[in-house]
Image (tube, helix red, strand yellow):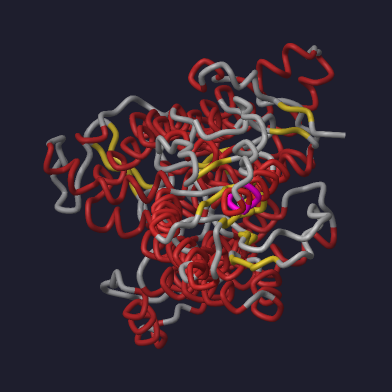
């Protein structure tokens, strides 16, 4: 049974399909029982998202409240407008490797402006129906850059996990590793102990109970133990959110997280790397375009991959174009409330499904839980140890790396896929995700074209063709062309037939029934072949033409030229015409009346 779709009919433009998943749920009948399930799922996911949002914001180089604002604003907008019934959006670990250099170079203001620009790009991608193109990103590319991002994230957390004193963290990965190695003697044992304790609870708690989320238990226990030790032993000093971050309210600076909801703000009024407002100008926009494009592409890939996984878990089917538009709206609006980049979060989406979510209202409830936590628990959240937040991200990095799949591909995948995988993995670590995905897709495309060129070929058929009952007359050559005639294969395939005039052929039949597609290069090569054969006095018949090549021939204004070129959808009619040609020439030589020029023409058989 095919999965039930959450999308409206695809004849409707994507912008008018906004909220397709929610509308589908309401149309099917939504009652109080469904809402109870959604509310419980929202509470569970909200509890999970609370520490994750703060940790991911810190890892991205901005204060923790910006991650919370992202989960609140982008989370509710993408849920209510999106095309997936159970997708949960917010800050994700995959963004860290991209956002850190943006925040370092352009500051918080530049990061938020770039995020809004990325939102516009995502809206355009969805509105123009580009959502399904993300499905063409090869699996080795996504696996390679995801594993590379996991390594980068884990490396960045070592400073807080071990309490290292690093005066300046370089942007380039290898230099970061060198800086961390040099700072190893400055390891703060209390930070390291808190980090190890948190990581141990995160790993072991799911084996004890899955009723309470492991991040909630681990951060709570580690925080209480750490403060108890600090009270008993004054020398036990460790970094917390409140000791690391502060905010201004009413002209006074306060430690920790503001006890305020997301408030409207113009992103370009926020500080750049030099501490002054970044402003909004053509020069700023031009400088941020590559960053915005990177955020948009990664957001599109992550959200649609997460939605596909959610489809497999629920049996539903999401609307990719609507999902992209919703992600775009979320990323466009969130920066105006202090939020950073957001996309579909696979771990939170899976937790949402396992908790019984039935509609997008569950993800909306998760945003409300995060909002309530900010308003009620902000002073308490400031006491969370930085080492615990780092431990949480280290575990996330380990899980997102999917190392079993990575190693399985290294052992069993074709060598070309292994090359793409390792290339993307290495480039993500050494450079960044943009370079990695760009090179990976280009490399994968080139390797795919080489494979297609290898499977495309031409075979001279004697009398073994399954559709030929009687031997072909002398002077008729039948070539079977197999595979798509595109720019990577056309020259190789067509070149085989270039010397047929030496074989004494009078008619060449090209069986193209196994050619599903032809592009401009294929047309040029085919036209050149026909011209050379006609110059040598050889007639050409294209037989068994499929729909796409026939449309390509019609668009190129190919015409039937009597005695030179005929085009047939039917293979049998093409062969019959070849027999008639030869029979007519033989009859002319004997002085007998020639038979008619092939079978009676039919409108749908000839060239158009």
Identify the main secondary structure in magenta.
Answer: helix
Examine the structure image and report whether residue 50 is included in the region drawn in magenta. Answer: no
x and y percentages locating residue 230 in the rendered image: 53, 66
Instruction: Name the residue at the right extreme.
Output: 1
Quarter of the N terminus within the rendering? top right
x and y percentages locating residue 548 in the rendered image: 56, 40
Q: Could you tell me which residue is drawn at 56 percent across and 43 percent down?
A: 303
Examine the structure image and report whether residue 584 is included in the region drawn in magenta. Answer: yes
Q: Could you tell me which residue is drawn at 58 percent across and 34 percent down?
A: 320
Residue nearest the viewer, comparing 290 with 226: 290
Q: Could you tell me which residue is drawn at 67 percent across and 74 percent down?
A: 413
Decide if residue 311 is on the left or right side of residue 156.
right
Instruction: Judge whether 415 appears above or below 198 on screen.
Output: below
Decide if residue 472 is on the left or right side of residue 381.
right
Stretch of the chain drawn in magenta: 582-586
x and y percentages locating residue 436 in the rendered image: 42, 65
Is any part of residue 272 visible from this angle?
yes
């Amino acid at each position: 049974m095919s999965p039930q779709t959450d999308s409206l009919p695809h004849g409707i433009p994507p912008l008018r399909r906004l909220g397709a998943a929610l509308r589908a749920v309401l149309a099917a009948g939504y009652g109080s029982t469904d809402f109870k399930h959604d509310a419980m799922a929202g509470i569970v996911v909200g509890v999970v998202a609370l520490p994750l949002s703060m940790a991911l914001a810190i890892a991205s180089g901005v204060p923790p409240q910006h991650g919370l604002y992202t989960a609140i604003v982008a989370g509710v907008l993408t849920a209510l407008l999106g095309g997936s019934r159970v997708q949960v959006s917010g800050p994700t670990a995959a963004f860290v490797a991209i956002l850190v250099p943006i925040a370092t170079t352009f500051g918080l203001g530049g990061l938020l402006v770039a995020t809004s620009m990325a939102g516009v790009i995502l809206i355009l991608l969805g509105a123009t129906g580009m959502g399904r193109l993300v499905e063409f990103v090869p699996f080795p590319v996504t696996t390679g850059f995801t594993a590379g991002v996991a390594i980068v994230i884990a490396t960045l957390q070592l400073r807080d996990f071990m309490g290292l004193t690093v005066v300046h963290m370089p942007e380039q990965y290898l230099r970061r590793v060198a800086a961390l190695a040099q700072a190893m003697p400055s390891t703060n044992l209390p930070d390291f102990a808190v980090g190890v304790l948190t990581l141990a609870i995160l790993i072991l708690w799911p084996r004890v109970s899955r009723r309470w989320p492991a991040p909630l238990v681990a951060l709570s226990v580690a925080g209480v133990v750490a403060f108890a030790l600090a009270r008993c032993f004054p020398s036990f000093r460790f970094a917390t959110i409140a000791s690391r971050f502060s905010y201004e309210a009413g002209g006074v600076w306060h430690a920790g997280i503001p006890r305020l909801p997301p408030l409207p703000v113009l992103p370009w009024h926020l500080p750049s790397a030099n501490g002054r407002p970044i402003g909004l100008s053509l020069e700023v926009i031009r400088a941020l375009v590559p960053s915005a494009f990177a955020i948009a592409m990664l957001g599109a890939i992550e959200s649609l991959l997460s939605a596909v996984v959610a489809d497999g878990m629920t049996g539903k089917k999401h609307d990719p174009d609507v999902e992209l538009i919703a992600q775009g709206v979320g990323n466009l609006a969130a920066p105006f409330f202090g939020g950073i980049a957001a996309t579909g979060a696979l771990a939170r989406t899976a937790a949402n499904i396992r908790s019984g979510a039935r509609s997008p209202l569950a993800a909306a409830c998760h945003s409300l839980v995060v909002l309530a936590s900010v308003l009620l628990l902000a002073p308490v959240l400031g006491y969370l140890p930085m080492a615990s937040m780092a431990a949480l991200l280290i575990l996330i990095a380990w899980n997102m790396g999917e190392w079993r799949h990575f190693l399985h591909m290294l052992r069993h995948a074709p060598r070309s896929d292994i090359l793409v995988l390792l290339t993307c993995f290495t480039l993500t670590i050494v450079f960044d995700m943009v370079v990695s995905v760009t090179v990976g897709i280009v490399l994968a495309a080139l390797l795919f074209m080489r494979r297609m060129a290898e499977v495309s070929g031409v075979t001279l058929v004697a009398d073994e063709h399954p559709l030929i009952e009687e031997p072909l007359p002398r002077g008729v050559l039948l070539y079977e062309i197999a595979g798509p005639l595109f720019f990577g294969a056309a020259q190789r395939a067509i070149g085989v037939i270039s010397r047929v005039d030496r074989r004494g052929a009078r008619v060449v039949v090209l069986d193209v029934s196994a050619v599903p597609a032809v592009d401009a290069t294929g047309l040029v090569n085919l036209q050149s072949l026909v011209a050379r054969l006609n110059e040598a006095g050889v007639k050409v018949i294209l037989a068994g033409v499929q729909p796409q090549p026939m449309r390509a021939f019609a668009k190129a204004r190919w015409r039937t030229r009597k005695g030179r070129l005929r085009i047939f959808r039917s293979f049998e009619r093409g062969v019959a015409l070849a027999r008639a040609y030869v029979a007519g020439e033989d009859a002319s030589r004997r002085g007998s009346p020639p038979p008619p020029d092939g079978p009676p023409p039919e409108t749908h058989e000839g060239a158009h």
